[in-house]
Image: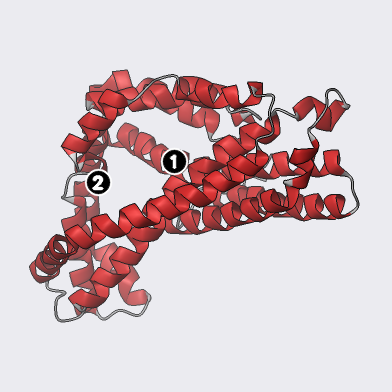
């Protein structure tokens, strides 16, 4: 059966949840190596669900539309490798246990395209080419909104809002100075640096779990500071958009501003924190042979850290599901892969 990507992601998260439950039962019965094995399986599936749902699938939509809209030919240097990579890595098993190809080849090349500006131009060109199709579908979109309970007047205003949003530059293009600075400091070998965690002989589970808490606290403080500084500007922009499309009398600006802030908070902080799953995963992964074949030893400190690791991964599991709900709505059919 050819399942949708939403179903594949749901299976990954369900299996991860079961792995975490199994890890706790095994730990309670003093089966430490088996518990570690299921922790590694859980962290792997959480990462795969996140990467597919929040990164790869939205990029697949851009790639597919670039071909159907005719913008792919203008960006052959970006489109070709991006399409082949996405179609490869969007299949869970192709990401592997250590995510080696994805981290050493795909992400650095993607970041290079972002830093050069070509990726941004590619995304914006595709969105601009898509806009006429949305305009051609005006009556169908309005009819769908009316079918869902909106009045025709409100449906037309919501349609205008969609057109207004799509007419803006892609969010990825916002903050040019920040983009340049981040690119100047970036390294292309960050994937390899994460894998070095597996070379460390000292225990790392407790430190990796504490890193999750630290990063979440830091991200929360940084976001609060930024949103406080830009709240006025955000409110002004929202007000102008609502007024331009005739929705100011239907959607209170304060309510919409609060809703957008809440969504931004969850999305921005969540996407920062979720990457702390990587060092945690690589820490557990270094015991791959010990948990599967009984080769090598595991420091007793790692066994003592299992309960807190289970708690941390449960938190990351919940966070991943929230981020995916924010990112994905209706899903087209995907490959029949869930492992």
**Figure quadrant of residue 208:** top right
What x and y, as percent, mark residue 118?
24, 26
Image: 93 above or below 75: below
In the rendered structure, the answer to whether residue 2 lies left or right of residue 274 reads: right
Residue 30: which numbered mark, if any?
none
The residue pinned by badge 2 equals 171
SS for callout 1: helix
The residue carrying pointer 2 sits among few (fewer than 14), some (14 to 19) or many (20 or more) residues within 10 Å by Cα, namely: few
- Residue 104 visible in the shown view: yes
**Figure quadrant of residue 130:** top left
| Quadrant housing the C terminus | top right
Question: Which residue lies at the image location 22% right of the left edge and 37% below the top edge?
Answer: 178
Image: 77 above or below 19: above
Mark 1 and mark 2 lie on one chain; the one further toward the N terminus is: 1
SS for callout 2: helix
Question: Which residue lies at the image location 62% right of the left edge and 52% below the top edge?
Answer: 312
Work out whether residue 144 or residue 103 is closer to the camera in this orientation and state it. 103
In the rendered structure, the answer to whether residue 195 lies left or right of residue 173 reads: right
The residue pinned by badge 1 equals 55
The residue carrying pointer 1 sits among few (fewer than 14), some (14 to 19) or many (20 or more) residues within 10 Å by Cα, namely: some
What x and y, as percent, mark residue 7?
60, 52
What x and y, as percent, mark residue 108?
40, 23
Question: Which residue lies at the image location 73% right of the left edge and 53% below the top edge?
Answer: 307
What x and y, as percent, mark residue 255?
26, 76
- Residue 337 visible in the shown view: no
**What number of labels is visible?**
2
Image: 161 above or below 125: below
Work out whether residue 95 or residue 36 is closer to the camera in this orientation and state it. 36
| Distance between mark 1 and mark 2 Cα atoms | 14 Å
The reply to whether callout 1 and callout 2 are in contact (CB within 8 Å) is: no
In the rendered structure, the answer to whether residue 257 lies left or right of residue 15 reads: left
Work out whether residue 271 or residue 279 is closer to the camera in this orientation and state it. 279
């Amino acid at each position: 059966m050819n399942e949708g990507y939403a179903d594949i992601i749901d299976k990954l998260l369900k299996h991860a949840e079961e792995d975490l439950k199994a890890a706790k039962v095994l730990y309670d019965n003093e089966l430490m190596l088996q518990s570690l094995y299921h922790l590694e399986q859980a962290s792997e599936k959480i990462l795969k669900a996140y990467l597919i749902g929040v990164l790869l699938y939205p990029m697949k939509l851009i790639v597919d539309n670039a071909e159907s809209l005719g913008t792919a030919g203008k960006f052959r240097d970006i489109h070709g490798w991006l399409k082949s990579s996405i179609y490869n890595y969007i299949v869970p098993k192709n990401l592997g246990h250590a995510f080696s190809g994805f981290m050493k080849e795909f992400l650095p090349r993607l970041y290079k395209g972002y830093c050069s500006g070509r990726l941004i131009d590619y995304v914006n060109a595709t969105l601009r080419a898509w806009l006429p199709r949305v305009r051609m579908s005006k009556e169908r979109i309005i009819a769908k909104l009316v079918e869902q309970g909106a009045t025709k007047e409100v449906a037309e205003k919501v349609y205008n809002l969609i057109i207004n949003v799509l007419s803006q530059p892609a969010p990825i293009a916002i903050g040019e100075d920040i983009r340049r600075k981040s690119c100047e400091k970036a390294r292309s070998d960050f994937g390899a640096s994460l894998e070095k965690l597996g070379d460390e002989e000292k225990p790392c589970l407790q430190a990796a779990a504490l890193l999750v808490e630290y990063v979440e606290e830091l991200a929360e403080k940084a976001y609060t500071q930024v949103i406080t500084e830009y709240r006025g500007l955000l409110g002004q922009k929202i007000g102008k958009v609502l007024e331009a499309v005739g929705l100011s009398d239907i959607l209170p600006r304060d309510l919409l501003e609060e809703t957008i802030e809440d969504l931004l908070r969850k999305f921005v902080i969540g996407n920062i924190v979720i990457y702390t799953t990587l060092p945690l995963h690589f820490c557990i992964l270094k015991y791959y042979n010990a948990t599967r074949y009984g080769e090598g030893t595991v420091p007793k400190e790692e066994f003592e850290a299992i309960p807190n690791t289970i708690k941390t991964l449960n938190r990351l599991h919940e966070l991943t599901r929230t981020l995916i709900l924010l990112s994905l709505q209706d899903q087209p059919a995907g490959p029949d892969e869930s492992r």
